[in-house]
Image (tube, helix red, strand yellow):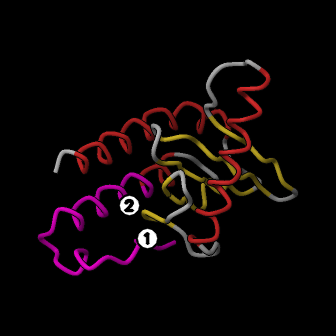
Amino acid sequence: MGPLSSPSPLSDNPQSPQSSQSSQLTGILISLRDRVMGVSESVLSTVDGLLVVADADAVHPESVAALAAATLGVSRRIADQAKVGPLREVVARCGSGHVIVLAVGERALLTVVGDDGLDLAAFQRESPATVEELTKVLAADVAY
């Protein structure tokens, strides 16, 4: 499993703030994979479907980012219409694994792919801290 980050003119400079931010974000994704059995890939993207960073080998991160944005948008509408409060996550249980999309603040989302052995209880325990860490790093970018 190898981290991928979105190309950026600033990311070629290892001293640039954007390069540091990408490294921090990728590190958070890798940490989630290391802490939760069954997490195989993860993609952090904007709510409009643009890739920010990814820890992925088997999936196409840009495609996952775009599809996750559509999933989150539709799911937020369903939650709103059902009047069940703000959306926290969308879980798709598939034939041989899971795909989970989580809101990361108002501007980003995290998509996690888990294999059939995904420890959902551990994921439920660990994901709030991961979302909080991602939110803090992304918020620091706004301060520049």
Asked whether, in this view, residue 39 is left or right of residue 33, the answer is right
63 and 120: which is toward the camera: 63
Indicate whether residue 86 is drawn in magenta. Answer: no
The kind of secondary structure the magenta stretch mainly shows is helix
Asked whether, in this view, residue 103 is left or right of residue 116, the answer is left
Query: Could you say which quadrant of the image residue 134 lies in?
Result: top left
Q: Which residue is mark 2?
A: 26
- Amino acid type for the residue under numbered disc 1: Pro
Residue 132 higher or lower than 108, as above or below: above
Using a 10 Å C-alpha cutoff, classify the residue at mark 2 as few (fewer than 14 neighbours), some (14 to 19) or many (20 or more). Answer: many
Residue at 50% from the left image edge and 64% from the top image edge = 50
Which label's residue is closer to the chain start, 2 or 1? Answer: 1
- Magenta part of the protein: which range? 1-30
Asked whether, in this view, residue 45 is left or right of residue 60, the answer is left
Residue 90 higher or lower than 113, as above or below: above
Spatial CA distance of label 2 from label 1 is 6 Å
Q: Which residue is mark 1?
A: 3
Asked whether, in this view, residue 26 is left or right of residue 12, the answer is right
Is label 2 in contact with label 1 (beta carbons under 8 Å)? yes
Residue 57 % position (x, y): 57, 75
Residue 103 % position (x, y): 54, 40
Residue at 62% from the left image edge and 63% from the top image edge = 66
- Amino acid type for the residue under numbered disc 2: Thr
Residue at 31% from the left image edge and 63% from the top image edge = 22
